[in-house]
Amino acid sequence: KMDYNDTNREIYGRVVIDRKEMQCELAVECVIVDHDTVDQKPVFVESYEFNLVKTEGSLLYFETRKALNDPGNR
């Protein structure tokens, strides 16, 4: 599940993951790409990690506040 608020200054995101029976460590990363219309290929723009803010049983809560470069053009 992901909730987000996209504005001209920052993106706020919240992701909740239910680990259930998984025994591994988990993380959330957002990768932003642009589409090159000449080469017809995705082009990496930036990435950022979400912070683990809370754990409740098997639920992991991740959040981020990130200022985007050139917002609204992706």
Image (tube, rainbow, N blue to C red):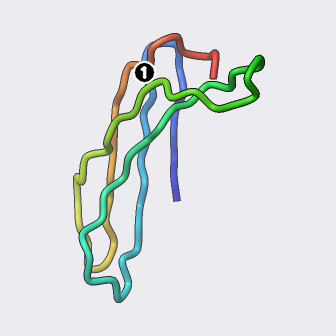
Residue at the image position 31 percent from the left and 42 percent from the top: 49
Please tell me which residue lies in front, 23 or 42. Answer: 42
Measured as percent of width and height from the top left, residue 55 is found at: 23, 67
Q: Is residue 16 left or right of residue 44?
A: left
Please tell me which residue lies in front, 22 or 7. Answer: 22
The residue to which callout 1 is attached is 10
Residue at the image position 76 percent from the left and 17 percent from the top: 38
Q: Residues within 10 Å of mark 1 (few under 14, many from 20)?
A: some
Q: Is residue 34 left or right of residue 52?
A: right
Residue at the image position 33 percent from the left and 72 percent from the top: 59
Q: Is residue 28 left or right of residue 71?
A: left
Please tell me which residue lies in front, 20 or 70. Answer: 70
Quadrant of the rendered image containing residue 46: top left
Measured as percent of width and height from the top left, residue 48 is found at: 34, 35
- Number of numbered discs overlaid on the protein picture: 1
Which amino acid lies under the numbered mark 1 shown in the image of this protein?
A: Glu
Measured as percent of width and height from the top left, residue 3 is found at: 51, 47
Q: Quadrant of the C terminus?
A: top right
Measured as percent of width and height from the top left, residue 34 is found at: 62, 25
Q: Work out whether 28 lies above or below 21.
A: above
Label 1 SS: loop
Residue at the image position 47 percent from the left and 38 percent from the top: 31
Q: Work out whether 10 lies above or below 50.
A: above
Q: Is residue 15 left or right of residue 62?
A: right
Residue found at the far front of this picture: 39
